[in-house]
Amino acid sequence: MNLRRLNPFAGLPNPKEVWAWGMYDLANQSFTLLIITLLFPIYLKKIVIAQGSSDPALLAAGDAVWARAQGGSLFLVVLISPLIGALSDARGLRKEVLIGSGLLCAALTCVLALAGPGDVWLAVAAFAMANIGFQLGENFLASFLPDLSTRKSMGRISALGWAMGYSGAVTLLVLTAVIFAIFGWKSEAQWRPMFVIAGLWFLFGMIPAIRLLRDDRKPASPPTGSIWTQSFGRLKETLSHATRYRQLVLFLAGFLIYAFGVQTVIAFASILAEEFGFKQSKLVLFVLQISATGAVAAIATAAFTGRLGAKRTVIAYLLVWIVSCTALAWLSMSRSRGGWSPEWMFWLIGNGLGFGLGGIGTATRALVGAFTPKHRSAEFFGLWGLTFKLAGAIGVLTFGEIKAGIGTTAALWTLTGFFVVGLAVVMFVNERAGRLAARNAERETARVF
């Protein structure tokens, strides 16, 4: 057997750097998975805010506080990202910002373990600042991809990073399930050590990036104007360029709307599962199922998008989302009325959500790439990332407030509506015209140079 074939980094000119880059993505899964998706939303709601009480009013307040902490911190990320990006480019501090934001997130993740019953401000402040660090780090990690790859190897290296992230998620979930089983934890109040584990996982996982990742992109000349002018001037210029590509703008509008739903599921998956009776180890297994199904969908999507077409692939996954969310809303309505709500059906819906989660990201990125001229790739993919974070802020806040004020079923019908409206907008996108506009722009640029 040729062992070289089993090495995913074989043949790359910079395998150590690519591995270090992917390790950062593997490391930060401890925050996005254990803190955002699995453990902290329930801990904040039931222990910090409700203080172990089952009072529905306190639990509803917990939903609202979680939505405001998550959505509010994402709004701040949207506001400061252009400023931080311009500052790092002007000073040549891209790696420093990447590592600094990761260290901030890792340290504050450990601080979450200090938040006990009633420590609402400590919990919210530590989470919000950690989330800002995490989200900024994601932005800067993506910015290294063009430097680590060529046009030919970009898809392969991007897939490697994606795969390393999913492997980190699965490993963390298995580790969490083992810890729960060994210590026999029965109460959410016992989860605090997991926040320290999550922070340390992130801290040690980013060491390869600290040591091996290089940033050769230094400013060629001193920047002109204030940093505010540079940052928001750049954003204005990006928006001006994007408006010349009608299909891209139309698709990003649809993406903004259906991403309300995607971000909401990421933020509320464990809370919804817990409300449907999934406790402790079963909750971990449920999220593990979503992660595994998502990984399969991401890999499969990369294989058939070329034949089916990017727009059709996006539409197919939106239909999966609509069916899954409709079923979830119906199940919630039936459950609230004392009707039929079998556990196996929630597991089945979870597979649908996982499949939609893994596939829609890959398909969306493919369609944005198809509509983007090569010389605008950094600008437009940055705009795509900013749109996704704005969607998280709006979607999570909307869902959380409706859930706290009216109830879970109404919030789930709203979630379904996000995908229905997003699909309606995407249906008007002309993929052929969008691809043609991108190719024409590339030809015009090539003639100029």
Image: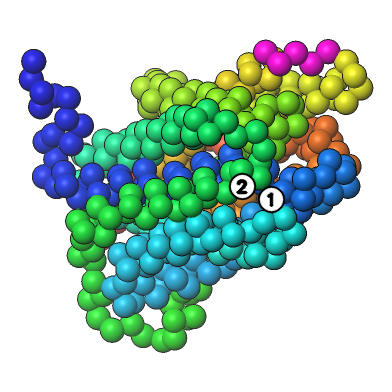
Mark 1, residue position: 44
Q: Which residue is drawn at 33% across and 49% down?
A: 205
Q: Give the range drawn in magenta.
A: 340-344
**In magenta segment, residue 356:** no
Would you place residue 381 above or below residue 331 in this image? below
Main SS of residues in magenta? loop
Q: Kindly tell me whether residue 126 is visible in this rendering.
A: yes
Does residue 42 sit above or below 136 in this rendering? above
Q: Quarter holding the N terminus? A: top left
Residue at 22 percent of width and 46 percent of height: 18
The reply to whether residue 428 is visible in this rendering is: no
User: Residue 286: x and y, percent?
Assistant: 58, 26
- Outermost residue toward the left? 2
Residue positioned 29% across, 36% down in the render? 160
Residue at horizontal 70 percent and vertical 62 percent from the top: 119
Q: Where is residue 298 in the image (x, y as percent from the top left)?
A: 43, 28
Q: In this view, does 282 lie above or below 402?
A: above
Assign a secondary structure to mark 2.
helix
Say which mark, if any, is on residue 40: 2
Q: Which colour scheme is used?
A: rainbow
Query: Viewed as shown, does residue 156 lie left or right of 325?
Result: left
Question: Foreground: 35 or 188?
Answer: 188
For residue 397, side relative to residue 59 (left or right): left
- Residue 341 included in the magenta stretch of the image: yes
Check whether the beta carbons of the residues at disc 1 and disc 2 lie within 8 A of each other. yes
Q: Tell me which amino acid carries mark 2.
A: Phe
